[in-house]
Amino acid sequence: MRVLVTGASGMLGRETARAFARRGDAVRVLQRRPSGLEGTEEVLGSITDPDAVRAAVAGVDTVVHLAAKVSITGPHAEFVAVNVDGTRTLLAQARAAGVRRFVMVSSPSVAHAGSALVGAGTTPADPGAAHGSYAVTKGQAELLALAADAPGFAVVAVRPHIVIGPGDTQLVQRIADRARAGRLPLLDAGTALIDTTYVDNAVDAMLAAADRADVAHGQAFVVTNGEPRTVAEVFARICAAAGVPAPTRRVPAAAAKVAGSVVERVWTWGRLPDEPPMTRFLAEQLSTAHWFDQRRTREVLRWAPRVPLDEGFRRLAGGFGR
């Protein structure tokens, strides 16, 4: 394949680009900052810039789209510009350039309205019911992408859930930092069961989606390790890898949701630069079960996780130099 990977500066995008290159595909990456990835061609720019996108898709036959604004707060317009309008620009330029396969990397949050998801299948994205600007705009982007599926332009949406891996700054490092500072509470004792995905398994799913696009096109697939654990255990295992104490302080989920709504508004109105300690969306994610039936994903993509979750947690220590 001749593959374009957008968003290669993040952990999942970086490792996906490396995996395509390792198996012999010609890989080009598009992101705003240099990725430092050997064996890839680099285009610097934003997916909001049509000229940069046009240069990035020229001559490729496959696009794996990971670039996104990922945050739990911020002006909604910024999420729309990157996640929705950027995806629309990429889709248009990809089709015009003759791209044949398009893998849209989405999120299970696009179909999560706040209630428990217990052994759930991959239900359609529902931006109207999703909570938080990230989930809403990723849902809109996924619907745009799947609507573009057509003969000669096979679109697959993949929703990896809570991807963890060594060196991850998006989730793992933040959990460790908050635990170290004593700012990582357990909501309702942390008993909610949640799915996670070790990064190598998520990468394998990206490649499988590209390889199986002719069969899987027009569909969305949730990807996880298929080994749900409690929030408390996930936190404890990440903290153990980082060498910091696991959280023990407990906060009622109902109180966290109310406080999170207030804090989110304050952060958004004040345009504060760092992440807020809590939002309503985050409180829902930390107190509500969300784990998924993986049978359809594994059957259609012919994919299965090769790194068990216990081994994945052990590997996290390497990202902290331990």
Image (cartoon, helix red, strand yellow):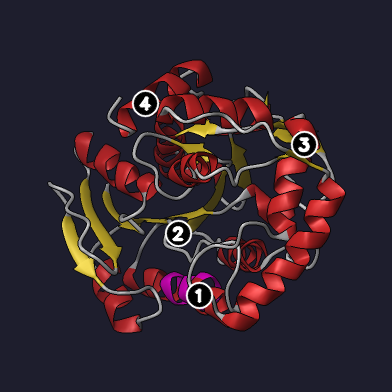
Q: Report the disc number at residue 317.
A: 4
Quadrant of residue 147 within the rendered picture? bottom right
Query: Disc 3 on helix, strand or loop?
Result: loop
x, y percent for residue 231: 67, 32
Q: Are marks 2 and 4 in contact (CB under 8 Å)?
A: no
Which residue lies at the image location 47% right of the left edge and 36% below the top edge?
164
What residue is shown with label 1?
88
Q: Nearer the viewer, mark 2 or mark 4?
A: 4
Q: Residues within 10 Å of mark 4 (few under 14, many from 20)?
A: many
Q: Tell me if 235 is positioned left or right of 45 in this view.
A: right
Residue type at mark 3 is: Ala
Q: Vertical placement of 174 versus 126: above or below?
A: above
Residue type at mark 4 is: Ala
Q: Which residues are magenta?
A: 83-91
What residue is shown with label 3?
289
Disc 2 or 1, which lies upstream in sequence?
Answer: 1
Q: Nearer the viewer, mark 4 or mark 1?
A: 4
x, y percent for residue 214: 49, 45
